[in-house]
Amino acid sequence: MNQLPFITDQDFGKLNGKAALPKGEYDGCHFEHCDFTQTPLSNYKFSDCTFSHCDLSNAPLVNTQLNQVRFTDCKLMGLDFSTCDDFLFTVHFERCPMDLCSFYQGRMPATTFLGCSLKKADFTEAELAGADFSDSNLEGALFEDCNLEGADFREAIYLSLDPARNRMKNARFKKEQLAGLLTKYSLQIE
């Protein structure tokens, strides 16, 4: 059986493409200003890693492990997180453009999306209990058959979801957001 190389506690800066990052298990590593746009990162393993100012847009993530991974100021457009290995999947996002990402059936309770753009992101059937969407743009984001119990939407903008299609006990909203919970009724709220 082929064992992946184990790389621990290293800093990687300004890498570009797959050739610059050999397939392996990365633990406690920090990636900064790396461009992995459309770079296949399938079957990689990242544990306790941070990505800062990186671009991973449209990178295939089939069977990729993301365990305690933090993305800060990273461009993550069009990523399909639903293809990641869901074992120990734990991520944190801060100030990341993540439009058109898919989290279909993702098991990600207490995930934080702080100041992110999640336009047209797909959260269908996602487990998001206790998630925090503070200061995030949810324009066109799809929430259907999700567990949103205890999720915090109070500072999110352009929120539109159907409470009848999601579990939402103790989810938190501002009263100004109530119109986004009634969209399907085509009401004129003034």
Image (spheres, grey):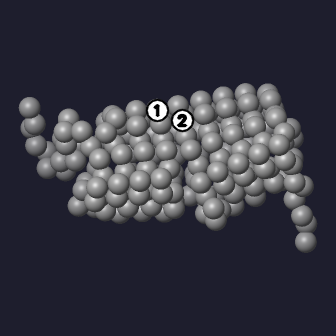
Q: Which residue does the image show at 51% across and 61% down from the upper left?
A: 107
Residue 79, x across and y down, in percent: 59, 46
Q: Which residue does the image show at 10% across and 43% down from the upper left?
A: 187
Say what secondary structure mark 1 lies in: loop
Tell me the quarter of the picture where residue 154 sits: top left
Q: Which mark is residue 94?
A: 2
- Closest to the observer, 52 or 56: 52
Q: Residues within 10 Å of mark 2 (few under 14, many from 20)?
A: many
Q: Is residue 27 left or right of residue 91?
A: right
Residue 174, x across and y down, in percent: 24, 39
Q: Residues within 10 Å of mark 1 (few under 14, many from 20)?
A: some
**Distance between mark 2 and mark 1 Cα atoms:** 6 Å
Say what secondary structure mark 2 lies in: strand
- Closest to the observer, 157 or 153: 153
Q: Is residue 73 above or below residue 129?
A: above
Residue 85, x across and y down, in percent: 65, 62
- Closest to the observer, 55 or 32: 32
Tell me if label 2 and label 1 are in contact, CB under 8 Å.
yes
Residue 57, x across and y down, in percent: 63, 38
Q: Is residue 42 visible?
A: no
Q: Is residue 70 visible?
A: yes
* Residue type at the position of mark 2: Glu
Mark 2 and mark 1 lie on one chain; the one further toward the N terminus is 2
| Residue designated by label 1 | 115
Q: Is residue 4 left or right of residue 75?
A: right
Tell me the quarter of the picture where residue 11 sits: top right
* Residue type at the position of mark 1: Gly
Q: Is residue 84 left or right of residue 47?
A: left
Q: Quadrant of the C terminus?
A: top left
